Image: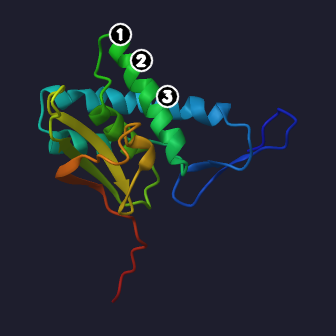
Amino acid sequence: MADDSGTGDTNRLTEDGALASTGRYRAPLDLVLFSEALIVARVASRVTSRPIPEVARAVMRTPVIVRTTDSRRAVRAAGRATSRLARRGAGLDTCLTRALVTAALLPRRSAVTLRIGFRPPSQASAVDGHAWLAVDGEDLEIMIPPGDAGQRHTQVLKIPMRSPRTSRKFSS
């Protein structure tokens, strides 16, 4: 589907249902991702009253029509959606809810794992916890807090959100 901006930029569907932009014009895709993220964020906000693995399964069962191959866009859309719900008192804006929502927006072909870790307390602060995603075994760097490069959190919990989809071949 081509845009009417005159720039020649287009968006296309990839084979796994993700919408990939082939140019610089991205506003329509970002708006659609935000709408999808709002729906998923309502489910993710149940994390305050339900076990994390149960909420993770519910998030991944939430129907998402448009996904993106650009992890930065997925993280941005998730952050906007969770903060909007938090401002209206309908959810939480935490690294955990953002990670859950982001996982739902990534392509189905990716193996996505939710990781939760803690950093030992320093003299001036309390124990510091953080949730982030690993996609295909690699930490999603955009979800690592700024200034955390040399002091990574120690992973204490790993929840597989999605295994990569493979083609199913039936033998007789």
Label 2 close to label 1 by CB (< 8 Å)? yes
Locate residue 57, reporting x and y percent.
23, 46
For residue 35, the mark is: 3
User: Which residue lies most toward the top here?
Assistant: 88
Q: Which residue is mark 2?
A: 84
What element does badge 3 sit on?
A: helix
- The residue under label 3 is which amino acid type? Ser
* 7 lies above or below 112: above
State which quarter of the image contains the C terminus.
Answer: bottom left
**Count of marks placed on residues:** 3
Q: CA distance from mark 3 to mark 1?
A: 16 Å
- The residue under label 1 is which amino acid type? Arg
Locate residue 83, reporting x and y percent.
39, 20
State which quarter of the image contains the N terminus.
Answer: top right
What element does badge 2 sit on?
A: helix
Q: Which residue is mark 1?
A: 88
